[in-house]
Each structure stands twice: as C-alpha cells, then as structure tokens.
Amino acid sequence: MSDHDRAVPRHAVHHGRSVWGAALKVLAITTAVVVASSASVAAIGIWSLGRTVAANAVDISNGGSVPTIAAMNGSFNVLLVGADNAPGQKSFGGARDATLNDVNILVHIAADHRSGVIMSLPRDLVIAHPECEDPTTHETFSAMAAQPLNTAFARGGLGCVVSTVESLTGIKVPYAALFSFEGTVKMADAVGGVPICVTKPINDTDAGLKLPAGRSVISGRTALAYLRSRHGVGDGSDLSRIGSQQAYMSSLLRTMMSRDTFTNPVKLYGLAQAAAQNVRLSQSLASEDTIVTMALALKNMNLQHLVFVQYPTGADPQNPNKVVPNTELADVLMRRIRADVPVELDKSSLGLSTELAPTAKAHAATASTTKASSSPTPTPTKTSTAVIDGLRGQTAAQQTCSIARSQP
C-alpha cells in the first residue's frame, strides 16, 4: 500500500467498486411510464418486458410474508442497491470473495406526492445487523453488532439489505431493486447521455476516467467511470464520491424531463428494456400495476422538492477507516421522513465534492439582485423549520459540478 493510500481512510478506498446512482433512483419512474404508455408501444413488447421483470424478481421478505400489492396511495419507499462482484461483471474489475451491497439508496416519496427524499447510505457505515435468512437456501444468519453496511448482501441477499436498512432507519421498505455494473452502463446508454461538469480536468486511472474541465455529456462506461471515481473528486473519500453521484442523478432527471423522455414511448421503452434486462426487482415491485402507480405519483413532482441527502455520519472512534451514524442528526432526518415533513437544504448543504455550476451561480446572483432591487425595505424572514443544519446534499433542480481533486 502506498503512502497516499495510507493517508486516506479506508472508507474512501473503493478500489474501483461501482456506483449505480445514475440508474437506481429513476428505475420505478421510467419503467412505470413505459407500461402506462402501452397504447403507443407494441403489445408484444410490453408483454415481453413484463415477463422479463417477473422472471428476475427477488424475494426480499427475509423469511416473512411478501407485502400485498395495492394501488399506490400515500407515501412509499424503495431501496435501490448496487451489488459489487455480481455475476457477469468480469470486465468491470477484479473478482472479490463475496458480493457486497456497495451502493444503498433509500427513496422516500411523501404521501401527497409533492416532495421526496433520496438518501445515500455509505458502504462503510458501521451499524448493527439483524438476523437474516437466505431466500434460496433458507440458511439463517445471526444478528451481529458493529459491522459495515456493505456486508449485508452476503448474509441473505437483497432481503437482508432491506432488513438492515429498516432496522437502522425505522422506515418500512416494501420495494427494492438490485443493480450491477452492466446495468448502469446499459441504463446510461439508453438515456442517451447525461451532462456533467468538473471544475478542473480529471485523469483517474483507477476508475478509468479522463474528463476535460467544464461540461461534458457522458454515457456508457464513461458514466460508470465518473460514478466510480474516488481519486478524481473532492478529498478522495467515498463520502466525496456520494456528492458526484448526487450531481449525476439530479442531472439525469433534468435531462429526461428536458428531452421529453416521459412522453416519448420509444425513449421510454428503450430505457425500460435496459432496466428489465439488467436490473432485478423485488417481487413486490415486479408488477406492472405497482410500477404504473409509482410513475403517476412521481412524474409531475417539482424537482426543487426532490432532495438528495447523505445519511449523517461521523468518524468511527474504533476504526479511522470506517464511519458511524451521527445519531443526533440522523434521528432528526428520520423523524422528518417518517412524518412526511419536506426536507429543505440551504446553500451550505452541498456535499464535500460539489459546488454550484457557473450558470447556476450566475442565476442565483441575478435572482438575489433582482429581489433586492424590487424590495428596498425587505421584511425579515423566518428560517424554514424544514432545513436541517449539518445535512449534506442537493435538490434535483440544482445544477452542480464535481470539484476535481488536486493532484500531488
């Protein structure tokens, strides 16, 4: 191990492990609207898509009963998981001893469908794990304390990851989806490219990423490399990489809306095919009716009210290479989510590796000047009670750039 690697905590060292944030959070939306647009898509295609999704469905009951599928009324929660070392990933990095849930994103949509929280949970978050049961072998794994979150998958698959996140957050998660490296590449290709920007040129040989300063439109393996890159952004930590993931995901949503993806059956069907062939859905989510109702709840949401946040953490006093929950801040966030109280972010909330894009900065400055000139005697405003001090993240509407890591 080099001196450089010693200087960075292990939670920052991903060794090329992937980030699937690009495709994860839009899975339910895109697949749903495709099915909802069946009048414009060949019936045989929809039938084939539905059959593929059902064939790949995963049992996440962890030994319990599968949730009853009903109309999507009120709030709902979906866990999106990126699996490292999954089958078929030979060309995406070295083999590992076990499959790890290295990306864990919890999506919560409020009951009124006007706001949502998309929360990234760090892979090296040290927490207690519940008892789990493998749905195939029925092997039981005992509960354990103080272990990284990304070990959950090896103890019972996707269902164990769901149970572990539920235990940590106190939030019931009836729906889940599992992504792989290949799934991320295919989804990025189906979208047709996503605009991102970086503050300086990046040449991260570990992730295979080379980008010029400024704006680029990326897809396929370049998108995957951007999402995997640790050495290229922020302080080189895995927590910094979460900021880049969120910048990408917000840009992806804005891109889809600007290209009328949700109203174009051809684009939607291509994206849905990529999802169906490369993503495994929980049995509870592998239903056309369920996916349709999710899409109808999400498609008109104001992106300013959809926020990406990082689960609050602090340094692990027992291991400098790991992180532990910031229980005080996490409790506040979890209470807001469970109570369906919208979460707001202020200008100091951006992640460790992101800043507002130049155009966004100029727009903010112009808006501020206009507001000041039109209100010469402004009335003091009260800070929104929804803002949580210390929470990191961004809204889906914010245009942000990744802060390139300074090279030695």
Image (cartoon, grey):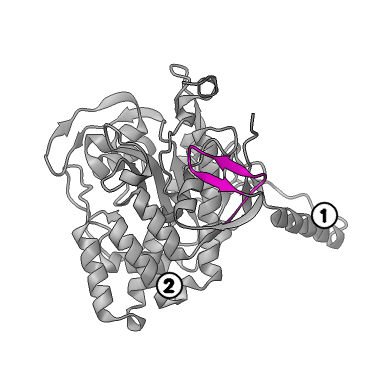
Q: Indicate whether 389 appears above or below 211.
A: above
Q: Amino acid at mark 1?
A: Pro
Q: Position of residue 78 (x, y in %)?
A: 36, 52
Image position of 168 (left or right of 244)? left
Q: Quadrant of residue 318?
A: top left
The residue labelled by disc 2 is: 267
Magenta stretch?
A: 195-211
Helix, strand or loop at mark 2: helix
Q: Is residue 122 located in the magenta-colored stretch of the structure?
A: no
Image position of 223 (left or right of 387)? left
| Residue occupying the point 36% across, 33% down | 149
141 or 204: nearer the viewer: 204
- Label 1: how many Cα within 10 Å (few below 14, some 14–19, many 20+): few
394 or 42: nearer the viewer: 42
Q: Position of residue 182 (x, y in %)?
A: 35, 52
* Total numbered labels: 2
**Residue found farthest to the top:** 318
Q: Indicate whether 326 appears above or below 364.
A: above
Q: Quadrant of residue 15?
A: top left
What label does residue 378 carry, if any?
A: 1
Q: Position of residue 317 (x, y in %)?
A: 47, 17
Q: Is residue 340 visible?
A: no
* Quadrant position of the C terminus in the picture: top right
Q: Amino acid at mark 2?
A: Lys
| Residue occupying the point 19% across, 52% down | 66
